[in-house]
Image (cartoon, coloured by chain):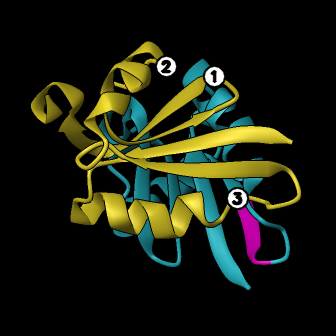
Chain colours: A yellow, B cyan
Amino acid sequence: MKQATFYHAGCPVCVSAEVEFAKALNPSEFRVSTVHLGEDSAQISTAERNGVKSVPAMVIDGNVFHINFGASIADLK
Amino acid sequence: MKQATFYHAGCPVCVSAEVEFAKALNPSEFRVSTVHLGEDSAQISTAERNGVKSVPAMVIDGNVFHINFGASIADLK
C-alpha cells in the first residue's frame, strides 16, 4: 500500500480538494491520512520537510502535489 | 460514476502528476480521461471553459484542481 498524506488548513479550497481528492484515491492502493495544519501546528515542520510549500497539498510516496495555489505554509506559522 | 478529466501538456511535472493522481483515483467511482493539450490543441477552449488556467489540472465533477503551479494555459496557444 502507498501512503498518501493530505495537508490542509481548513480553508474552503482545502475542504473541496479534500472531498474530491483525498477521498477519491483508490482504497486498495492508498492509505490516506489527513493533517489539519491549522489545528496541529506541530506537523508544520514535517510538512515542510516533505516539501510542502502551500496548502492544500497531497504527498504521495514522497511526491508533493500542491493544489490550487492555496495558502502559503509560512502563513500558518 | 464521476467523470474526472486530467489535462496536461506532456511536461515532467505533468507526467508525474498523471502517474500519481490520474491513475490513483478509485476506478469503481471515477471514469478518468486524459487530455494532452500539447497534442490536442482543439481541447484548449474546452479546458478553459472548464476553468483550467494552468496544467497539469484535474477536473472532477466540474471542480478544477490545478496541480503544482504548472504551465499557464495561455502558453499552450
Instruction: Name the residue carrying label 2.
Output: A50
Amino acid type assigned to the residue bearing label 3 in the image? Leu
Separation of residues labelled 3 and 1 (CA atoms): 16 Å
Q: Earlier in the sequence, mark 2 or mark 3?
A: 3
Is B39 part of what is drawn in magenta? Answer: no
Marks 2, 3: nearer the viewer: 2
Q: Secondary structure at mark 1?
A: loop
Label 3 lies in what chain? Answer: A
Residue at image point 65% right, 51% down: A32
Residue B30 pos. (x, y %): 74, 73
Where, by quadrant of the figure, is residue A53 drawn? top left
Instruction: Name the residue carrying label 1.
Output: A62
Labels 2 and 3 within one chain: yes
Q: Secondary structure at mark 2?
A: loop
**Above or below A50: residue A64:** below
Separation of residues labelled 2 and 1 (CA atoms): 7 Å
Instruction: Name the residue carrying label 3.
Output: A25
Give the farthest residue toward the top: A49
- Asked if marks 2 and 1 touch (Cβ < 8 Å), the reply is yes
Label 2 lies in what chain? Answer: A
Residue B47 pos. (x, y %): 45, 60
Label 1 lies in what chain? Answer: A
Q: Earlier in the sequence, mark 3 or mark 1?
A: 3
Amino acid type assigned to the residue bearing label 2 in the image? Asn
Separation of residues labelled 2 and 3 (CA atoms): 20 Å
Labels 2 and 1 within one chain: yes
B56 to the left or right of A71: right
**Above or below B3: residue A21:** above
The boundaries of the magenta stretch are B29-33
